Image (spheres, rainbow, N blue to C red):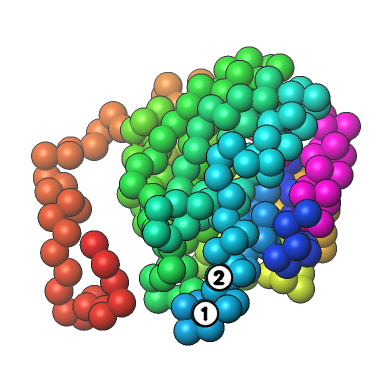
Amino acid sequence: MQLTVALLQLASCGMDQQANLVKGEDYCRRAADAGADIALFPEMWNIGYTFATPTDPDAYQQWLVCAVEREDAYLLHFRALARELGMAIAITYLERWQSRPRNTVSLIDRRGQVVLTYAKVHTCEFGPEAVLTPGDAFPVTTLETAQGQVQVGTMICYDREFPESARILMLNGAEVILVPNACNIEENRKAQLRTRAYENMLGVAMANYAAPQNNGHSIAFDGIVFEEVNGTWSTRDHCLLQAGEEEGIYMANFDLRRMRAYREKAIWGNAYRRPRYYQPLIDGAVAYPFLREDATR
Protein backbone atom coordinates (compact mmCIF):
# COMPACT_ATOMS: atom_id res chain seq x y z
CA MET A 1 0.00 0.00 0.00
CA GLN A 2 1.36 3.37 -1.05
CA LEU A 3 0.25 6.47 0.88
CA THR A 4 0.95 9.84 -0.75
CA VAL A 5 0.99 12.95 1.43
CA ALA A 6 1.12 16.35 -0.29
CA LEU A 7 3.14 18.82 1.80
CA LEU A 8 1.60 22.20 0.97
CA GLN A 9 4.55 24.55 1.45
CA LEU A 10 2.81 27.88 0.99
CA ALA A 11 3.16 31.58 1.75
CA SER A 12 0.05 32.85 3.50
CA CYS A 13 -2.00 35.98 2.91
CA GLY A 14 -1.61 37.01 6.55
CA MET A 15 -4.86 37.45 8.44
CA ASP A 16 -6.94 37.58 5.25
CA GLN A 17 -8.89 34.42 5.97
CA GLN A 18 -10.85 34.45 2.72
CA ALA A 19 -7.70 34.82 0.63
CA ASN A 20 -6.08 31.95 2.54
CA LEU A 21 -9.17 29.82 1.97
CA VAL A 22 -9.11 30.48 -1.78
CA LYS A 23 -5.38 29.81 -2.05
CA GLY A 24 -5.68 26.69 0.10
CA GLU A 25 -8.45 25.32 -2.11
CA ASP A 26 -6.37 25.93 -5.23
CA TYR A 27 -3.43 23.99 -3.83
CA CYS A 28 -5.67 21.17 -2.61
CA ARG A 29 -7.01 20.81 -6.14
CA ARG A 30 -3.47 20.67 -7.49
CA ALA A 31 -2.52 18.07 -4.89
CA ALA A 32 -5.51 15.91 -5.79
CA ASP A 33 -4.65 16.18 -9.49
CA ALA A 34 -1.14 14.97 -8.62
CA GLY A 35 -2.53 11.89 -6.88
CA ALA A 36 -2.30 12.81 -3.19
CA ASP A 37 -4.19 10.81 -0.58
CA ILE A 38 -3.72 13.56 2.05
CA ALA A 39 -3.04 17.29 1.71
CA LEU A 40 -1.21 18.76 4.72
CA PHE A 41 -1.25 22.50 5.50
CA PRO A 42 1.27 24.52 7.52
CA GLU A 43 0.35 25.57 11.05
CA MET A 44 -2.72 27.77 11.70
CA TRP A 45 -3.32 28.36 7.99
CA ASN A 46 -6.57 30.32 8.27
CA ILE A 47 -4.67 33.39 9.53
CA GLY A 48 -1.16 32.51 8.38
CA TYR A 49 0.11 31.93 11.90
CA THR A 50 -0.43 35.60 12.78
CA PHE A 51 -0.65 36.76 16.40
CA ALA A 52 -1.70 39.76 18.46
CA THR A 53 -1.30 40.28 22.19
CA PRO A 54 -3.56 41.75 24.89
CA THR A 55 -1.13 44.67 25.24
CA ASP A 56 -2.75 46.02 22.06
CA PRO A 57 -6.47 45.54 22.86
CA ASP A 58 -7.83 46.60 19.46
CA ALA A 59 -5.49 44.34 17.48
CA TYR A 60 -6.07 41.53 19.96
CA GLN A 61 -9.86 41.72 19.54
CA GLN A 62 -9.49 41.71 15.74
CA TRP A 63 -7.31 38.63 16.07
CA LEU A 64 -9.79 36.86 18.35
CA VAL A 65 -12.54 37.45 15.80
CA CYS A 66 -10.52 35.34 13.33
CA ALA A 67 -10.86 32.23 15.51
CA VAL A 68 -13.26 29.72 13.96
CA GLU A 69 -15.45 26.97 15.35
CA ARG A 70 -15.61 23.45 13.96
CA GLU A 71 -19.00 24.06 12.35
CA ASP A 72 -18.08 27.44 10.84
CA ALA A 73 -17.96 28.07 7.10
CA TYR A 74 -14.16 27.74 7.01
CA LEU A 75 -14.13 24.11 8.09
CA LEU A 76 -17.33 23.26 6.23
CA HIS A 77 -15.72 24.56 3.04
CA PHE A 78 -12.76 22.19 3.33
CA ARG A 79 -15.05 19.32 4.29
CA ALA A 80 -17.00 19.84 1.07
CA LEU A 81 -13.74 20.16 -0.87
CA ALA A 82 -12.35 16.89 0.55
CA ARG A 83 -15.57 15.13 -0.41
CA GLU A 84 -15.49 16.60 -3.94
CA LEU A 85 -11.83 15.69 -4.49
CA GLY A 86 -11.95 12.30 -2.78
CA MET A 87 -8.83 13.31 -0.84
CA ALA A 88 -8.18 13.74 2.88
CA ILE A 89 -7.23 17.24 4.02
CA ALA A 90 -5.37 18.14 7.23
CA ILE A 91 -6.55 21.73 7.64
CA THR A 92 -5.17 24.04 10.34
CA TYR A 93 -6.72 27.03 12.06
CA LEU A 94 -7.04 29.23 15.10
CA GLU A 95 -9.93 27.55 16.92
CA ARG A 96 -12.41 29.47 19.07
CA TRP A 97 -12.22 27.93 22.52
CA GLN A 98 -13.63 29.17 25.81
CA SER A 99 -11.67 32.22 27.01
CA ARG A 100 -8.57 31.65 24.87
CA PRO A 101 -8.34 30.07 21.40
CA ARG A 102 -6.43 26.94 20.42
CA ASN A 103 -3.92 26.10 17.69
CA THR A 104 -5.71 23.24 15.93
CA VAL A 105 -5.57 20.80 13.04
CA SER A 106 -8.56 18.79 11.82
CA LEU A 107 -8.11 15.76 9.60
CA ILE A 108 -10.97 15.47 7.12
CA ASP A 109 -11.36 12.17 5.30
CA ARG A 110 -12.11 11.77 1.59
CA ARG A 111 -15.84 11.60 2.34
CA GLY A 112 -15.79 14.98 4.06
CA GLN A 113 -15.99 13.74 7.65
CA VAL A 114 -13.76 15.12 10.39
CA VAL A 115 -12.10 12.00 11.80
CA LEU A 116 -9.54 13.65 14.07
CA THR A 117 -9.09 17.05 15.70
CA TYR A 118 -5.93 17.87 17.63
CA ALA A 119 -4.98 21.05 19.51
CA LYS A 120 -1.29 21.78 20.04
CA VAL A 121 -0.27 20.50 23.48
CA HIS A 122 3.15 22.15 23.73
CA THR A 123 2.24 25.75 23.04
CA CYS A 124 5.18 28.18 23.02
CA GLU A 125 4.44 29.93 26.31
CA PHE A 126 7.66 31.93 26.02
CA GLY A 127 6.32 33.72 22.91
CA PRO A 128 3.11 34.88 21.22
CA GLU A 129 1.45 31.49 21.82
CA ALA A 130 1.16 32.37 25.51
CA VAL A 131 -2.36 33.60 24.64
CA LEU A 132 -3.47 30.11 23.54
CA THR A 133 -5.17 27.27 25.38
CA PRO A 134 -3.01 24.11 25.13
CA GLY A 135 -4.50 20.84 23.95
CA ASP A 136 -4.76 17.89 26.30
CA ALA A 137 -4.43 14.66 24.28
CA PHE A 138 -2.68 12.98 21.32
CA PRO A 139 -5.46 11.20 19.42
CA VAL A 140 -4.98 8.70 16.59
CA THR A 141 -7.57 7.77 13.98
CA THR A 142 -8.10 5.14 11.32
CA LEU A 143 -8.09 7.04 8.03
CA GLU A 144 -9.78 5.40 5.07
CA THR A 145 -8.00 6.28 1.84
CA ALA A 146 -8.43 5.07 -1.72
CA GLN A 147 -5.38 2.86 -1.05
CA GLY A 148 -6.70 1.37 2.19
CA GLN A 149 -6.60 2.11 5.90
CA VAL A 150 -3.79 3.88 7.76
CA GLN A 151 -3.46 4.90 11.41
CA VAL A 152 -2.79 8.64 11.54
CA GLY A 153 -1.89 11.01 14.37
CA THR A 154 -0.81 14.64 14.43
CA MET A 155 1.48 16.91 16.35
CA ILE A 156 2.18 20.59 15.69
CA CYS A 157 5.56 22.33 15.34
CA TYR A 158 7.02 22.71 18.88
CA ASP A 159 5.51 19.35 19.89
CA ARG A 160 8.43 17.76 18.04
CA GLU A 161 10.80 19.08 20.74
CA PHE A 162 9.33 16.61 23.21
CA PRO A 163 9.91 12.90 22.47
CA GLU A 164 6.80 12.06 24.48
CA SER A 165 4.56 13.56 21.77
CA ALA A 166 5.50 11.08 19.07
CA ARG A 167 5.96 8.26 21.58
CA ILE A 168 2.37 8.59 22.82
CA LEU A 169 1.14 8.70 19.23
CA MET A 170 3.06 5.49 18.52
CA LEU A 171 1.62 3.86 21.64
CA ASN A 172 -1.84 4.95 20.48
CA GLY A 173 -1.26 3.10 17.22
CA ALA A 174 -0.04 5.76 14.79
CA GLU A 175 1.74 4.62 11.63
CA VAL A 176 2.12 8.13 10.19
CA ILE A 177 2.32 11.48 12.01
CA LEU A 178 1.29 14.68 10.21
CA VAL A 179 3.13 17.79 11.43
CA PRO A 180 1.90 21.29 10.52
CA ASN A 181 4.75 23.75 11.14
CA ALA A 182 5.48 27.48 11.34
CA CYS A 183 9.12 28.19 12.13
CA ASN A 184 12.47 28.29 10.38
CA ILE A 185 13.79 24.78 9.87
CA GLU A 186 17.48 24.09 10.35
CA GLU A 187 19.55 20.95 10.85
CA ASN A 188 18.72 20.44 14.52
CA ARG A 189 14.96 20.67 13.94
CA LYS A 190 15.24 18.30 11.00
CA ALA A 191 17.16 15.93 13.27
CA GLN A 192 14.32 16.00 15.79
CA LEU A 193 11.79 14.95 13.17
CA ARG A 194 14.18 12.33 11.82
CA THR A 195 14.63 10.90 15.30
CA ARG A 196 10.91 10.89 16.12
CA ALA A 197 10.37 8.73 13.02
CA TYR A 198 13.40 6.52 13.70
CA GLU A 199 12.75 5.74 17.38
CA ASN A 200 9.04 5.01 16.86
CA MET A 201 9.29 3.23 13.50
CA LEU A 202 6.66 5.41 11.86
CA GLY A 203 6.29 7.97 9.11
CA VAL A 204 6.60 11.71 9.76
CA ALA A 205 5.42 14.32 7.25
CA MET A 206 5.98 18.02 8.03
CA ALA A 207 4.63 21.00 6.06
CA ASN A 208 6.14 24.44 6.70
CA TYR A 209 5.54 27.95 5.38
CA ALA A 210 7.56 28.94 2.33
CA ALA A 211 10.08 31.79 2.34
CA PRO A 212 10.02 34.58 3.21
CA GLN A 213 7.39 33.87 5.87
CA ASN A 214 9.53 31.00 7.16
CA ASN A 215 12.15 29.09 5.22
CA GLY A 216 10.30 26.08 3.86
CA HIS A 217 12.29 22.83 4.00
CA SER A 218 9.18 20.73 4.46
CA ILE A 219 10.37 17.18 4.99
CA ALA A 220 9.26 13.56 5.35
CA PHE A 221 10.75 10.38 6.85
CA ASP A 222 9.48 6.80 6.74
CA GLY A 223 11.29 5.47 9.83
CA ILE A 224 13.00 2.57 8.04
CA VAL A 225 16.61 3.11 9.11
CA PHE A 226 17.93 -0.34 8.20
CA GLU A 227 17.19 -2.57 5.24
CA GLU A 228 18.01 -6.19 4.57
CA VAL A 229 20.07 -6.76 1.43
CA ASN A 230 21.09 -10.33 0.57
CA GLY A 231 20.61 -11.41 4.17
CA THR A 232 22.62 -8.52 5.61
CA TRP A 233 21.20 -5.47 7.41
CA SER A 234 22.53 -2.16 6.09
CA THR A 235 21.93 1.38 7.31
CA ARG A 236 19.58 3.53 5.24
CA ASP A 237 18.78 7.24 4.99
CA HIS A 238 15.05 7.29 5.69
CA CYS A 239 14.44 10.85 4.46
CA LEU A 240 11.88 10.58 1.65
CA LEU A 241 12.11 14.18 0.51
CA GLN A 242 13.18 17.63 1.59
CA ALA A 243 11.87 20.79 -0.04
CA GLY A 244 13.81 23.96 -0.65
CA GLU A 245 12.55 27.38 0.44
CA GLU A 246 10.17 28.08 -2.43
CA GLU A 247 6.42 27.69 -2.48
CA GLY A 248 5.08 24.46 -3.91
CA ILE A 249 3.53 21.03 -3.41
CA TYR A 250 5.94 18.33 -2.32
CA MET A 251 4.77 14.72 -2.53
CA ALA A 252 5.90 12.23 0.12
CA ASN A 253 5.27 8.60 -0.79
CA PHE A 254 5.09 6.17 2.13
CA ASP A 255 5.38 2.46 1.31
CA LEU A 256 3.13 1.22 4.10
CA ARG A 257 3.55 -2.44 3.20
CA ARG A 258 7.30 -2.09 3.65
CA MET A 259 6.93 0.06 6.79
CA ARG A 260 4.60 -2.48 8.39
CA ALA A 261 6.94 -5.37 7.60
CA TYR A 262 9.83 -3.43 9.13
CA ARG A 263 7.83 -2.66 12.27
CA GLU A 264 7.25 -6.39 12.78
CA LYS A 265 11.00 -7.10 12.88
CA ALA A 266 13.03 -4.12 14.11
CA ILE A 267 13.93 -3.42 17.73
CA TRP A 268 12.49 0.07 18.30
CA GLY A 269 8.92 1.04 19.10
CA ASN A 270 7.26 -0.61 22.09
CA ALA A 271 8.54 -4.19 22.47
CA TYR A 272 11.58 -3.54 24.68
CA ARG A 273 10.39 -0.53 26.67
CA ARG A 274 10.37 -0.72 30.49
CA PRO A 275 7.69 1.77 31.53
CA ARG A 276 7.85 0.79 35.20
CA TYR A 277 11.09 2.79 35.41
CA TYR A 278 9.73 5.90 33.73
CA GLN A 279 7.86 7.50 36.65
CA PRO A 280 9.97 10.72 36.59
CA LEU A 281 8.55 11.42 33.13
CA ILE A 282 5.12 12.08 34.61
CA ASP A 283 6.00 13.50 38.03
CA GLY A 284 5.90 17.05 36.68
CA ALA A 285 8.57 18.42 39.02
CA VAL A 286 10.78 21.17 37.60
CA ALA A 287 14.09 22.08 39.23
CA TYR A 288 17.08 24.31 38.52
CA PRO A 289 18.31 25.04 35.84
CA PHE A 290 14.96 24.55 34.08
CA LEU A 291 12.83 26.95 36.12
CA ARG A 292 10.94 29.46 33.93
CA GLU A 293 8.52 32.10 35.23
CA ASP A 294 6.31 31.92 32.12
CA ALA A 295 5.89 28.12 32.15
CA THR A 296 2.66 26.50 33.29
CA ARG A 297 2.09 22.81 34.02
Quadrant where the image shows the N terminus: top right
**SS at mark 1 in the image:** helix
Labels 2 & 1 near each other (Cβ < 8 A) = yes
The amino acid type of the residue labelled 1 equals Pro
Q: Check residue 31 for magenta coloring.
A: yes
- Coordinates of residue 24 in the picture (x, y in percent): 78, 48
Q: Residue at label 2? A: 61
216 up-or-down from 166: above or below: below
Mark carried by residue 57: 1
- Coordinates of residue 256 in the picture (x, y in percent): 60, 24
From the viewer's perspective, tell me whether residue 51 is left or right of residue 132.
right
- Coordinates of residue 257 in the picture (x, y in percent): 59, 20
Q: How many marks?
A: 2
Quadrant where the image shows the C terminus: bottom left
The magenta segment: 19-39
- Coordinates of residue 99 in the picture (x, y in percent): 39, 59
Residue drawn at (41%, 35%) of the image: 139
